[in-house]
Amino acid sequence: MNDSRSSFPRAARPVALAIVAHGTRSAQGLAQSRAFARALAERLALPAQLCFLELAEPDLDTGLALSAEAVHGAGDVTVLPLFLGAGDHYKSDTPDAMRRCAERYPGVTFRYAVPLGPHPRLIDLLRLRVEQALATHPDRASPEETALLVVGRGSLEEDSNSEIARLACLLRSGAPWRAVEYAFQAVKHPTVAEGVARCRQLGARQVVVAPYLLFAGRVYDDICATSARAAEPDMAVIHAEYLAGSSDSVHGDAPRAWLVDVAEQRAREAHPWA
């Protein structure tokens, strides 16, 4: 998405926003990320460029360059990562691309925002997606017979993985679940299958799988398929949606707008332009 509007906030230097997403081959996931980027650009009233680390265009280097051009090579670019944790993409890939672009555009100041998570609104949204999933199953088991399995993508960075464990602890506090466990889709243990097995060992006859992901895509599909295969014949598996939900529209969807709230906060923390 390239918003070519020429109006800028009242500031000494023009400001643009570069929104960095993971990328996916999923048409639904791409539509959701683009709708999200449009909603955020409208909220902030800034020229905004969505770009992707992989699997979609424009790529990260191209997106940063387009953002630099949007401020005419002499302004500020706030780089907002649509990441839920500080993994390798946040610590290495994106900063490396920012340095390359800064060499090409020495008049541009790049301001790097922190990842979206951890944030209380994201925890609230994950709880909501779990409640919505349970509401679609009238024959569901009682909370005392139900385990909640929080699933993250998995990272080589331990502080990013530890955030999933912390999230599970927060969801366990004061909740009626028989157990709250966590797992990872890739890279780290426990795997999704191991997480489902652990829930069974703890006596759950129903597992609610809660993916800690932003949008649709292969990772979400894999979590759902793997958890379904791992379940015992007498164990029910209920899949909650990813945080953004299945609608392609942000407008009129108050829970999904919570994500825009979090992204706006992160952008303004990096550069309080107005």
Image (cartoon, helix red, strand yellow):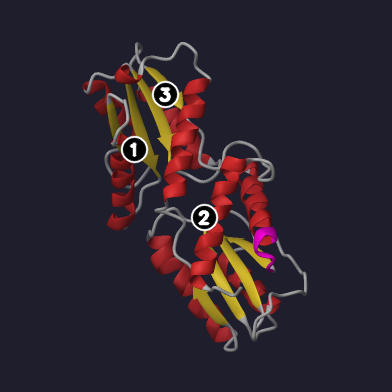
* Mark 2 vs mark 1, CA separation in Å: 19 Å
Q: Amino acid at mark 2?
A: Val
Residue beneath the point at 35% across and 52% down: 155
**For mark 1, what is the residue?**
171
Main secondary structure found in the magenta portion: helix
Amino acid beneath label 1: Leu
* Crowd band around label 2 with a 10 angstrom C-alpha radius: few (<14), some (14–19), many (20+): some
Q: Residue furthest left?
A: 201
Labels 3 & 2 near each other (Cβ < 8 A): no
* Relative image position of residue 198 (x, y in whole percent): 25, 28
In terms of secondary structure, where does tag 1 sit? helix
Determine the secondary structure under disc 3: helix
Q: Which residues are magenta?
A: 42-46
Query: In the image shown, does 196 or 246 lie closer to the viewer?
Result: 246
Element type where label 2 sits in the image: helix
Residue under pointer 3: 228
Mark identifier at residue 262: 2
Q: Is residue 32 magenta?
A: no
Report x, y in % for residue 268. 54, 68
For disc 3, the neighbor class at 10 Å (few under 14, some 14 to 19, many from 20) is many
Q: Is residue 73 visible?
A: yes
